[in-house]
């Protein structure tokens, strides 16, 4: 311990201990925050999925049918419209939650979704 080289190593060891503790704290904090964010996004996705599934199941089991159990043309058109609205809701819900997709709520994004058939002009306005 009296040698200059060993004394310098001792100082380096102290610096290493401080850096290791700081690095461990920072990594633990950000991994925990990331995991909490992931859980919240996952739960939101599952909640929306469950609500849409329940809503669509109620509609599918209660629409008008023919005597043979087949859907009437009006019922098929209704369910098709509801499916289109559900998809549009899903896209716009994520656009409102994630900054990455917020461009979809702009006039340009809405026009692009209209051109791709996700919505019509009446819905865009």
Image (cartoon, grey):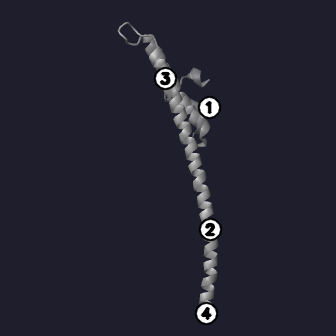
* Element class at badge 2: helix
* Element class at badge 1: helix
* Element class at badge 4: loop
For the residues labelled 1 and 3, the Cα–Cα distance comes to 29 Å
**Pick the front one: 104 or 39:** 39
Residue 100, above or below 49: below
Label 4 Cα crowd, 10 Å radius (few <14 / some 14-19 / many 20+): few
**Lower sequence index among marks 1 and 3:** 3
Q: Nearer the viewer, mark 3 or mark 2?
A: 2
Cβ–Cβ under 8 Å for marks 2 and 4 = no
Judged from this view, the residue extending furthest toward the top is 67
Q: Which residue is mark 1?
A: 107
User: Label for residue 21?
Assistant: 2
For the residues labelled 2 and 4, the Cα–Cα distance comes to 28 Å
User: Label for residue 56?
Assistant: 3
Q: Nearer the viewer, mark 1 or mark 4?
A: 4
**Which residue occupies 57% across, 55% down?**
31
């Amino acid at each position: 311990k009296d040698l200059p080289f060993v004394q310098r190593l001792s100082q380096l060891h102290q610096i290493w201990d401080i850096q290791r503790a700081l690095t461990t704290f920072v990594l633990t904090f950000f991994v925990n925050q990331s995991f909490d964010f992931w859980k919240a996004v996952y739960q939101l996705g599952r909640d929306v999925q469950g609500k849409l599934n329940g809503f669509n199941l109620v509609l599918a089991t209660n629409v008008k049918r023919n005597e043979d159990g087949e859907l009437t043309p009006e019922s098929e058109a209704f369910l098709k419209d509801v499916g289109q609205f559900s998809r549009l809701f899903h896209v716009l819900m994520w656009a409102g939650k994630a900054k990455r997709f917020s461009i979809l709520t702009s006039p340009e994004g809405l026009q692009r979704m209209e051109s791709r058939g996700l919505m019509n002009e009446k819905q865009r306005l």
